[in-house]
Amino acid sequence: MNKKKIVIVGAGPGGLATAMQLAQAGCDVTVLERRDRVGGRTSAIETEGFRFDCGPTFFLYPRVLAEIFHSVGRDLMEEVPMERLDPQYRLTFGGERGGVLDCTPDMDEMDRQIAKFSEADVGQLRRYMDDNREKLEKFRPILESPFNSPLDLLRPSLLGAAAKLHPFRSLGKELERYFSDPRLVIAFAFQAKYLGMSPFNCPSLFSILSFLEYEHGVFHPIGGCSRVSERMAEIAEELGVKIRLNEPVDSIEIQDQRVTALRTSQDRYTVDAIVVNADFADWMTKTVPNETRRRWTNEKIEKKKFSCSTFMLYLGIEGMYEDLPHHNIHISETYDRNLREIELDHVLSSDPSVYVQNACVTDPSLAPAGCSTLYVLVPVSHQSENIDWSTQADAFREKTLDQLAAIGLGDVRDRIRVEHRITPDDWVNDYAIYKGATFNLAHNLGQMLHLRPKNRFDELDGVYLVGGGTHPGSGLPVIYESSRISSRLLLEDLGISTQFIDEAAKGVPVTNGIAASLRDPAMA
């Protein structure tokens, strides 16, 4: 019996998870990756003995990936050892009121810290956690199922969840139901930035993001989040997957609205189906002829709302900031204005918020002896005619380094030994991300569920999507979930059993390391 031939375009986290599952199902799987390494935005940047995560540094809600690993006979925590962080991160607020919050899953300790911000808000975090525990249970069937048409909105699971989701309420407004101090509202709503959005424009259903951190933990994979991608690629190859690096797809062959083959500069690949893990908007506009698309034409894609981008500094420094936690977020004094400048005005802020990862306090393996790494991320507008990065990048670097003094890094310039920079232009040119929007299509109500590009792409037969540009959306846990949804659809369409995926999705056995770590933080 001939195996079904599947080509996956892109070796990002969604593509690699899909490759593992399709290979386990007995398919002949080839992954074509345009860059020289696996991982996409979840790859490593390595230079002079320093190792940085390129993109994601927060590893949240490992349950989904643990179940995918279990479906192919592996244990996530054994394959990629992880540390559960406590504190999860430090929040530093600018301005006269200021304040520092070391966020921890210890609810008693959180109440003690919250009391320093607002006595009236003590106890509200527990209420928030209880409400969102129930919301997640209602929301999970939505995250874990494909949405093919408006009729899917009438599913009993979605109708039952509607009372808890409040889709027309913003995340910021949702948090104001719990906290009176605006700093605390931001402390539990800033996670909208994981989706590249302002919490005051992001739907309230995403209040589960902060809940997931406190309930299930913030993890650091030893070697970085990029190590998860690298191990997934190794396992995929052990399962028989062929991974071709430095091999972008040049064109596709279409017959009767079905993709039958892909061409690269090195080969021609006939296929029974393809899975697109490349950036959706970039790949469609560059690879699929515009005349074959009606709903997702170049013109319509151009008019869609896209997430923010990021300005990145990867700094190898002498010594280590031992008193600085692993994750740090500085909330600027002019936070509301900063959000407006990113999403509406599309200009660079004079008072940007900044995220800093000080990973070597947890994982010294990421730097040479006597040194450490700092990963610095600043949310900025996606590509805009208002910003010329060729002339403004140097000055914005200086502004970013100035901001680091607010979290105790005033001497960082004197300690830099290695530096790498990524601007929105680099996300476009080097990483093939449409407009440099690192979090893909925005997650507003007009671009979610059946209104997002579908997991089974409905404009070409035999094409399936995984990654942040399809349902359920951006962020590693839901990207992994997109791989599970699309793998099921593809296998069902080819008449191949999905029982191994379905059985694993019922839950990882209690003997599995990840299950233990999720039950008891002390065991992680």
Image (cartoon, rainbow, N blue to C red):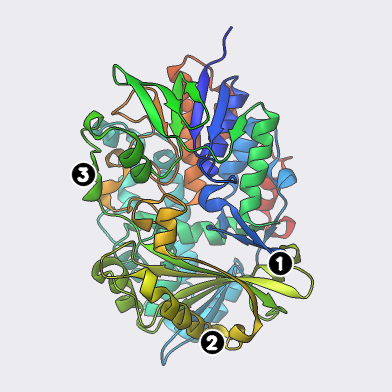
In which quadrant of the rendered image does the C terminus lie? Answer: bottom right
Q: Are marks 3 and 2 in contact (CB under 8 Å)?
A: no
Q: Residue furthest bottom?
A: 96
> Residue 430 at x, y = what percent?
47, 54
What amino acid is labelled 1 in the image? Answer: Thr
Which label's residue is closer to the chain start, 2 or 1? 1
128 sits left or right of 407 in the view: left
Mark 3 → mark 2, Cα distance in angstroms: 43 Å
**Which image quadrant for residue 390?**
bottom left
Mark 1 highlights which residue?
Answer: 362
In which quadrant of the rendered image does the N terminus lie? Answer: top right
Mark 3 highlights which residue?
Answer: 300
Mark 2 highlights which residue?
Answer: 405
Q: Are marks 1 and 3 in contact (CB under 8 Å)?
A: no
**Which image quadrant for residue 102?**
bottom right
What amino acid is labelled 2 in the image? Answer: Ala
Q: Bin the neighbour count of mark 1 within 10 Å (Cα to Cα): few under 14, some 14-19, many 20 and up.
A: some
> Residue 471 at x, y = what percent?
38, 41
> Residue 8 at x, y = what percent?
50, 32
Mark 1 → mark 3, Cα distance in angstroms: 45 Å
> Residue 150 at x, y = what percent?
24, 34
